[in-house]
Amino acid sequence: MQWTISNGGSCAPSIDQLTIIFEVAPTVAAAGSDQALCGTNATLAANVPTSGTGQWTISSGAGGSFADDLDPTSGFTGVNGSSYVLRWTITNSCGSTFDEVSIQFLPDPSVANAGPDQIICGSTLTNLAANTPAIGTGTWTIVNGAGGAVVTPSSPTSQFVGSAGVAYTLRWIITNGSCTPSTDDVVINFAASPTVTSPVNACVNSAAPSLTASATGATAIHWFTDAALTNEVFVGSLYTPAASELNMTVVGTTTFFATAEYGCGMSTSSQVTVNVVNTPGCSGGVNCSVFTVNINDTRPSCSDQDDGIMEFNISGGSGSYVVTLYDSLTTPGTPFTKALPGTSGAPITFIDLSPSLNYFYRINDGTNICTLPFSLPVQTTVNATADPASFQDATCFGDPSGVAIINASGSQTGDYFYSVDNGVTWTIFTPGNPITNLPPNGTYNILVGESVNDACRTSVSVTINSANPQINAAFVVTPATCNTNDGAIQVTAAGGSGSGYEFSIDGGNTFQATNQFNTLAGGAYTLRVRDGIGCFRDFTVNVTFPGFVNHTIVPSDADCSNQGNSGSITVTIPDPGVYQVALSTDQFNEPPNDQYLNYNNPSVTFSDLARGTYFVYIKSTGASCPTRSAPISILGVQALSFEILPVCTADELSISLTNLTGEPGSPFEIQVYRKLTNVLVQSINFSAIPITGSVELNYNDYVFLQTPGDYQILMTQINSTAFCLVQSELVDFTVAADLFAEVISTQQSLPDINTGSIVISNFNGGLPGYFTFVELASPAVPGQSFEAGPDVVEQNLNNDYEIEYDRIPAGQYEIIVTDQNGCSITLTAVVPLDTRIIVPNVFTPNGDGVNDSFFIRNLPADSKLIVSNRWGKEVFSSNGYQNNWTGEGLLDGVYFYRLKSADGDPITGWVEIIRGVKP
């Protein structure tokens, strides 16, 4: 802009210029995100100004510097372990804006120290001993070892729960932001069994192999020849069996057992299997290659099993041979050995052979000897294969819920069965459909046949493992005082799915998310831990109290023996002392004293137990309260039992079989026998035990209920798991003859005084004893009533059942007679009304309200009464007497009356007035 001043003349104007710039406000400063990083160098990240210029300054923190304080992305160098606040300021002529950023140079984390390695015997719980980080935070991880859990992963001294016989490597990791973590490993060895190589195969007639075993931290390795670990043969990690311990001249299998010795005790054993074999890889003997051998075999049939054939066609060598066939489970020359001579070009045939997977044949031509194995299995009834693509591991550790598909064909019965326990139990299945109850036992064989106990079954191999580790738990127990509910259990869970744990102390009926159980009485509890996918594991936890008895309990499941009443519970008390032990099915009430047994070392066993839940009570001398065990489950075969409940409709007897106990979902049969005979009267089949636990046998449907006699009732069932017939005890039951009783006499009753009676007698039939109920159904005098019973019918002096009802009003009665079964009959009886006119010979008109008038019972209407004294003088008369003469105005004494009704003869007599003294 230009400013000009002139005077309008010829003078030159005065001129000045002005420049005006309209500038925008400076860019809003943005210093970038806060940073926490290791080392001493950071790269800043402020915004580039579009208006103005920016500059970095240090607001707080010492010893830092910028590579270029005008660069929004300048480098910044500080001191390790220090924190800085840096300011980014953008300025122009209009002013300035700023923003700050925090830069923290983190120190390196503390050096991790996981603590010393530990070897633990007799426990699966230990406390870790890592260092507490001065800088950073620590956490535990499991590097190797299955089934273990760190209770509190962030605690350097957390509890660790593992499994006996397993060694774990745990890693303590200390981190501090993005700094390189510091780690250290520790080995927690719960007396791990040795690491071995097994199986070991060695050729027959060769040198014995050297067996190896190792265990970290062990002081020695011990070798045994028996599973009971009683015959020790060597100490050391490298063991070469002697000839007396391993026969290398005979094909067969020998098992050795190695244990690790630690400072705290001995581990469980690891098994080493040595197979002495004579396979083609063992060359078969001297110059086996000189022979050419072709074998045509016919496998033994399932029906005969002794009709196998092996035909040898041999060439080479001398041309003259002796072929010896023997079973490798024996040696040549003992139980099965057969030798046949032959020549080249002519078959040498062995017939009538039994099946064996362990045949060996030896060819000897006088110079060369060749020995080789041969398998001649029986002809199987079915063909079967397992589909590896269908294998699914069990979701829960150890739970029989693995899945596999088995394809099978060839069954002559149309059915297919499988067994996972080498033929002990069999289950029917449909080929091609998933089998969903397989145990997670790793790789194992499943037998497949066309029937239960198929003698010519085949086998398939499956691999089923557990998808998740076992659930583990650690417990903190607060002891209870005796007879007081002040104990507590706190549980910390690990393993399983790893989260979502819930807890139950009542056998799984109810669960809670909190891990604390309070107000507990002393005793043993079964605490169930369930993870987030529904898997669970039960733990026995003892809430101790004064007098608590340490004990161990070993239950044995019921089998088919003793009709399923074959379970047992063995109680062992390790501590010295005098004890008594009782068994009960009641969790809350202690058994009476007479049910306790004296404890005798080494244990007490309760036998002949049916499937169910039991509790053991133990008390020591002087203890004021007993020790109760956790619930003990006896599983296995279900024993059968029932109760008979008579159900009567009038005199028709039906029965209800209640509290039916047996295998749920399986058919069962009720058999009715004549008592003390083997005569089967009736057999009744049912598809399964109803949910109500009872079935009714109706009178109209079953002939035996209509036929009096003594019977015994039996329940039978084929157990679907063990495939055995289980029977209940015989239960006696009597179908009585028809119930009978009769009224043998009645006594009439006055209308105003109950003087009647009924006698009921001749009871028979039904099931003694008897009961009666009596009711006046139709009274002779309106307004009167009577009801009695049920009353017990007693036996009279003649031992006959009889009952009398006396002092009852007149009328028609209904009498219900019942027996012990509840069956009933109805009788009727009539108690007559006594209508005689009864005139008293005395009355006492003294005003006491009792007998104050001359009362004539059954007085006819319009009766005329005349009363005279002893001299014949009339003292009272009435043409319509109403029982209202009180002798008013007359002296006590005897008076004479004449009573005349309209339709009867006169009645005469005397009556005495006696007033006496009013009470």
Image (tube, rainbow, N blue to C red):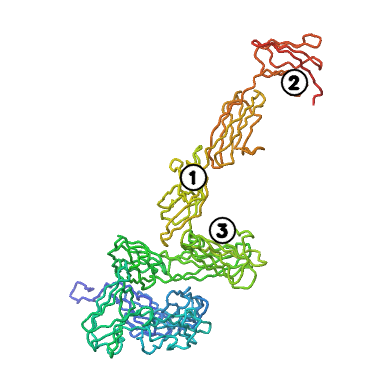
Query: How would you rate the neighbour count of disc 2 (Cα within 10 Å): few for under 14, some for 14-19, many for 20 or more?
Result: some
Of badges 3 and 2, nearer the viewer stands 3
In the image, residue 14 above or below residue 636: below
Of badges 2 and 1, nearer the viewer stands 1
Q: Quadrant of the C terminus?
A: top right
Q: Which numbered disc covers residue 728?
A: none
Which amino acid lies under the numbered mark 2 shown in the image of this protein?
A: Asp
- Please name the residue that numbered disc 3 is placed on: 586
- Provide residue 469's location: percent of width, then percent of height: 42, 72
**In the rendered structure, are the residues bearing label 2 and label 1 in contact, judged by CB atoms less than 8 Å apart?**
no
Q: Secondary structure at mark 1?
A: strand
- Provide residue 193's location: percent of width, then percent of height: 46, 81
Q: Quadrant of residue 288?
A: bottom left
Q: Secondary structure at mark 2?
A: loop
- Please name the residue that numbered disc 2 is placed on: 852
Q: What's the distance in space between the residues labelled 2 and 1, CA to CA?
A: 62 Å
Of all residues, the one furthest to the left in this rendering is 10
- Precedes in sequence: disc 3 or disc 1: 3
In the image, residue 300 above or below residue 72: above
Q: Quadrant of residue 55?
A: bottom left
* Residue 2 at least partly seen: yes
Of badges 3 and 1, nearer the viewer stands 1
- Please name the residue that numbered disc 1 is placed on: 655
Q: What's the distance in space between the residues labelled 3 and 1, CA to CA?
A: 30 Å
Q: What's the distance in space between the residues labelled 3 and 2, CA to CA?
A: 70 Å
In the image: residue 102, left or right of residue 387: right
Which amino acid lies under the numbered mark 1 shown in the image of this protein?
A: Ile
Q: Secondary structure at mark 3?
A: loop
Q: Quadrant of residue 850?
A: top right
- Precedes in sequence: disc 2 or disc 1: 1
Which amino acid lies under the numbered mark 3 shown in the image of this protein?
A: Asp
